[in-house]
Image (tube, grey):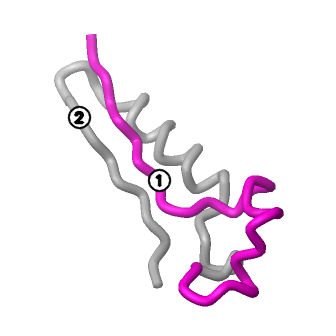
Amino acid sequence: MRATLISPGAVDTAIWDPVDPDNRRGFLKRAAMLRPEDVAEAVLFVASRPDRVSIPELHVEPRI
């Protein structure tokens, strides 16, 4: 059995709506955040590795 911890950085989803990071100092602007499909691609990458490959942890961060 394999397990992977996927740790995404800020992802532009509705959870940010009440926070309004575009108008808060010190917050990453939504345009620079990851997209949900970026995280989905990371999950697909990990899940598609051969059985002999283990990826214990994967950090996915926006390039800023």
Instruction: Write down the residue under mark 1.
Output: 8
Magenta part, dominant SS: loop
Q: Quadrant of residue 19?
A: bottom right
Query: Observer-nearest residue: 53 or 24?
Result: 24
The circle on residue 25 is none
Q: Position of residue 3 (x, y in %)?
A: 31, 23
Q: Is residue 37 above or below residue 64?
A: above
**Residue numbers of the magenta segment:** 1-27
Q: Is residue 6 above or below residue 13?
A: above
Furthest toward the top, the residue is 1
Given the image, on which type of amino acid does mark 1 rest? Pro
Q: Is residue 35 above or below residue 42?
A: below
Q: Secondary structure at mark 2?
A: loop
Inter-mark Cα distance, 1 to 2: 14 Å
Q: Position of residue 16 (x, y in %)?
A: 73, 62
Q: Secondary structure at mark 1?
A: strand
Q: Quadrant of the N terminus?
A: top left
Residue drawn where x is 20% and y is 29% of the image: 53
Mark 1 and mark 2 residues within 8 Å of each other at the beta carbon: no
Q: Position of residue 23 (x, y in %)?
A: 75, 87
Q: Quadrant of residue 30?
A: bottom right
Instruction: Write down the residue under mark 2.
Output: 56
Query: Observer-nearest residue: 11 or 18?
Result: 18
Mark 1 or mark 2: name the one nearer the start of the chain.
1
Number of disc labels? 2
Residue drawn where x is 54% and y is 85% of the image: 26
Q: Position of residue 17 (x, y in %)?
A: 82, 63
Q: Is residue 63 above or below residue 41?
A: below
Given the image, on which type of amino acid does mark 2 rest? Pro
Residue drawn where x is 17% and y is 23% of the image: 52
